Image: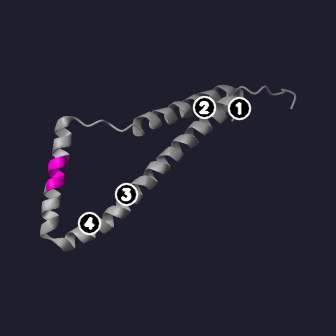
């Protein structure tokens, strides 16, 4: 406990910088979408065509896939929002911790 009280300014600054760094790394790692090459686009188009052919053969399977795809889209949107909120929270905690370390305190208390 004595070690924490002696070095609390340094500890808060290190925690603040780490949280800010961690938040920016999460943001720039997860937020940007990667571009696709021509081969990847062609593979996606081929998979889409194969899926449409197989869907025309069995109408019952396509109905069940459509109903689950709506839930999957909603789930992915929710996860993306949660990741954005987590990034904002981590950066906010880092900024608060870093700012708190620069506040001057009276030593008499």
**Quadrant of the rendering where the N terminus is positioned:** top right
Other-residue count near label 4 (Cα within 10 Å), few / some / many at <14 / 14–19 / ≥20? few
Q: Mark 4 and 2 residues: CB-CB less than 8 Å, in contact? A: no
The residue wearing badge 4 is 65
Q: Nearer the viewer, mark 3 or mark 2?
A: 3
User: Residue 71: which quarter of the image?
Assistant: bottom left
Q: Nearer the viewer, mark 3 or mark 1?
A: 3
Q: CA distance from mark 4 to mark 3?
A: 12 Å
Numbered range of the magenta stretch = 45-49
Residue 22 is left or right of residue 1, and the answer is left
Q: Mark 2 and 1 residues: CB-CB less than 8 Å, in contact? A: yes
Count of marks overlaid on the render: 4
Other-residue count near label 3 (Cα within 10 Å), few / some / many at <14 / 14–19 / ≥20? few
Tell me if residue 76 comes above or below residue 2 in the rendering. below
The numbered mark at residue 73 is: 3
Q: CA distance from mark 2 to mark 1?
A: 9 Å
The residue wearing badge 1 is 100
The numbered mark at residue 16 is: 2
Question: Which structural element holds mark 3?
Answer: helix
Residue at figure coordinates x 14%, y 49% from the top left: 46
Mark 3 or 2, nearer chain start:
2
Other-residue count near label 2 (Cα within 10 Å), few / some / many at <14 / 14–19 / ≥20? many
Residue at figure coordinates x 13%, y 63% from the top left: 54
Q: CA distance from mark 4 to mark 2?
A: 46 Å
Front one among 59 and 73? 59
Mark 4 or 3, nearer chain start:
4
Mark 4 or 1, nearer chain start:
4
């Amino acid at each position: 406990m004595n070690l924490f009280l002696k070095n609390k300014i340094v500890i808060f600054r290190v925690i603040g910088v780490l949280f800010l760094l961690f938040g920016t790394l999460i943001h720039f790692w997860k937020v940007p979408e990667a571009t696709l090459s021509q081969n990847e686009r062609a593979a996606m188009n081929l998979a889409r065509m194969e899926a449409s052919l197989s869907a025309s053969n069995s109408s019952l399977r396509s109905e069940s896939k459509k109903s689950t795809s709506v839930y999957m889209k909603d789930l992915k949107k929710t996860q993306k929002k949660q990741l954005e909120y987590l990034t904002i929270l981590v950066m906010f905690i880092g900024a608060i911790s870093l700012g708190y370390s620069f506040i001057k305190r009276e030593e008499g208390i």
